[in-house]
Amino acid sequence: MSKLDMNQPAIRPRRLRAGTSIRALVRETRLAPGQLILPLFVKQDSGEPEPIDSMPGVFRWSVADAVEQAERALACGIPGILLFGLGRERDEEGSPAWHPDGPTPRAVQAIKQAVPEICVFTDVCLCGSTAHGHCGVVRDGAIDNDATLQGLARVALCHARAGADFVAPSGMMDGRVAHLRTALDRAGCKGTGILSYAVKYASAFYGPFREAAASAPAFGDRKTHQMDAANAREAVRESQLDQREGADMLMVKPALPCLDILRRVRKKVELPVVAYSVSGEYAMLKAAAAAGWLDERAAVLESLTAIRRAGADAIVTYHALAAAQWLKQEAK
Ligand code: PBG
């Protein structure tokens, strides 16, 4: 090869990056408000929104304020919300979680009445209602899987009867999808879907959420049910199992530390895959942005695009409202 050839590459990938228009034309991954789901914390009382220290910009809302947030989301093009009820009562079995006057069923009802088009997902777990903060019924110091399923079915039915479009069991108990599907069908809730947290790791990135929901376990940890971050094949197994048990959609959680998992799961199952960009991911970006170390808008949109690129069809993110607004500005 002559010296001249070496200085003049025959192939120039930069042509496809030369201007805004060509970059838009060859873009492989699209990110749109229609792919986002906004999580909302709903409290029991009707007082002012309560800020959460480790999640700046995220609040515990009253039912009335949650309705307003749902209206805002839909107006921004966000088609779904994921509700976390924060009840005041707790007991050994977590029974306040299936009380029809609890914050989740009340919020579901009010939101479906005011904004019927929005798709309402509800988190189904016991950790916010058990005295010990564990995701299930504890017997002899360990979570009893099968006793927990019965409680989860009661929670799912309570949410379904209030009008939830999809219940989202988040506790990683074995057999939960089949158990909930059967319970819903028997109760005549055939139209209520299941978004299964199929792949949920025992992650350090849930810390701020546990502050928000006061759901940290009083003893021990969640490693006997949530997955070991070192495992990837197990994620495929869990996903295929939930697909077979009748889940309508699958969740992978957390998102940024699991991009490889999203890709693997995407290839091995046909169901829609939702990534949950969790509280710790939000807190990291917020803290760095507040310190002036990161450009929040650019870092958030890049992260969400990476999650989509890895294989997520939709993304649960606390940045949903901001991201939807940024995306709208970009589209102009
Ligand atoms: C309840 C639940 C948790 C999250 C969602 N549902 C906490 C946990 O498993 O400890 C975490 C969400 C987040 O960090 O944003 N089981």
Image: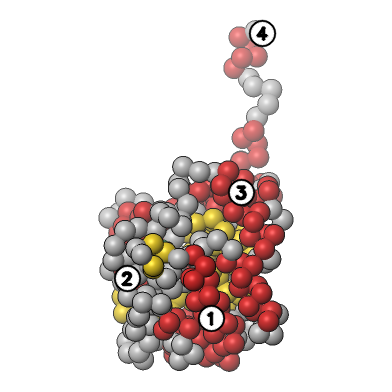
Nearest-to-viewer mark from 3 and 2:
2
Could you tell me how far apart the alpha carbons at marks 3 and 4 are, in whole angstroms?
48 Å
Q: Residue furthest top?
A: 2
Task: Give the residue drawn at x 39%, y 68%.
Answer: 138
Q: Which residue is mark 1?
A: 154
Extreme front residue here?
Answer: 140
Residue at mark 2? 132
| Alpha carbon distance from label 3 to label 2 | 31 Å
The amino acid marked with disc number 2 is His
Quarter of the figure with the C terminus: bottom right
Binning the other alpha carbons within 10 Å of mark 3 as few (below 14), some (14 to 19) or many (20 upward) gives many
Q: Earlier in the sequence, mark 1 or mark 3?
A: 1
- Give the secondary structure at mark 2: loop
Q: What residue is pinned by disc 4?
A: 1
First of labels 1, 4 by sequence position: 4
Q: Earlier in the sequence, mark 2 or mark 1?
A: 2
Label 3 vs 2, first from the N-terminus: 2
At 57% from the left edge and 59% from the top edge, which residue is drawn?
Answer: 198
Badge 1 density bin: few <14, some 14–19, many ≥20, Cα 10 Å:
some
Q: Nearer the viewer, residue 326 or 255?
A: 255
- Marks 4 and 2, Cα distance to the nearest angstrom? 72 Å
Quadrant of the drawing holding the N terminus? top right
Mark-to-mark CA distance, 1 and 4: 74 Å
Task: Identify the secondary structure beneath mark 3.
Answer: helix
**Amino acid type of the residue that numbered disc 1 sits on in the rendered structure:** Arg
Q: Tell me which corner region of the image, top left, top right, bottom left or bottom right, holds residue 3.
A: top right
Residue 116 in picture, x, y percent from top left: 62, 86
